[in-house]
Amino acid sequence: MASETATATRKYEPGTHPSLPPPVATSGPIYWIRYNLFDSPTSAMLTILSLYLLYLILPPFLHWAVFDATVNAASRGECQQAGSGACWAFVKDRFLLLIYGFYPIEERWRFNLSIVFILVSIAALL
């Protein structure tokens, strides 16, 4: 018993103390969830309410935007006949217009080069 106490209170030279893992109750995902989402009764109620709203909103949105969506159609009438989901056929046809707007085709290399520079800068920061 005396040797255990001596080991527990042993003095280490600076820089020689053994690395120990943090206590389980003060780190990890369970601690983060407990501290950030269920810290008080108010935050617990808001967390539960948010999860319930996501449960109500997310499945219908996914059915409309993904599962019941129309990707290929020649006209708006075909999209409406195909189902009640989103009509992504026009987005696919107008993708370059959505990305570049009315920027001249011969000058799009400038936009592309600026995007490359931005991505390289972000990669350097990361």
Image (cartoon, rainbow, N blue to C red):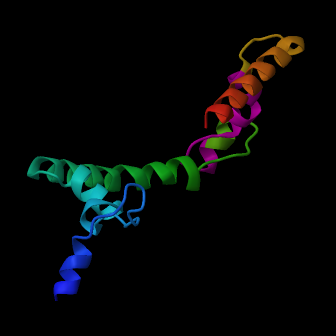
Toward which corner of the image does residue 51 lie, by quadrant? bottom left
The residue shown at (76%, 38%) is: 74
Give percent across and percent down for residue 114.
75, 19
The front one of 23 and 34 is 23
Compared with 124, 14 (above or below) is below
Toward which corner of the image does residue 112 lie, by quadrant? top right
The residue shown at (70%, 30%) is: 119
Give percent across and percent down for residue 17.
38, 63
Question: In the figure, is residue 9 to the left or right of 12?
Answer: left
Q: Is residue 68 in view from this perspective?
A: no
Residues rendered magenta in the picture: 80-99
The front one of 96 and 21 is 21
Question: In the figure, is residue 86 to the left or right of 106?
Answer: left
The front one of 34 and 49 is 34
The residue shown at (22%, 85%) is: 3
Compared with 118, 20 (above or below) is below
The residue shown at (81%, 15%) is: 110
- Residue 35 on the magenta segment: no
Of the 4 image quadrants, the one containing the C terminus is top right
Compared with 11, 4 (above or below) is below
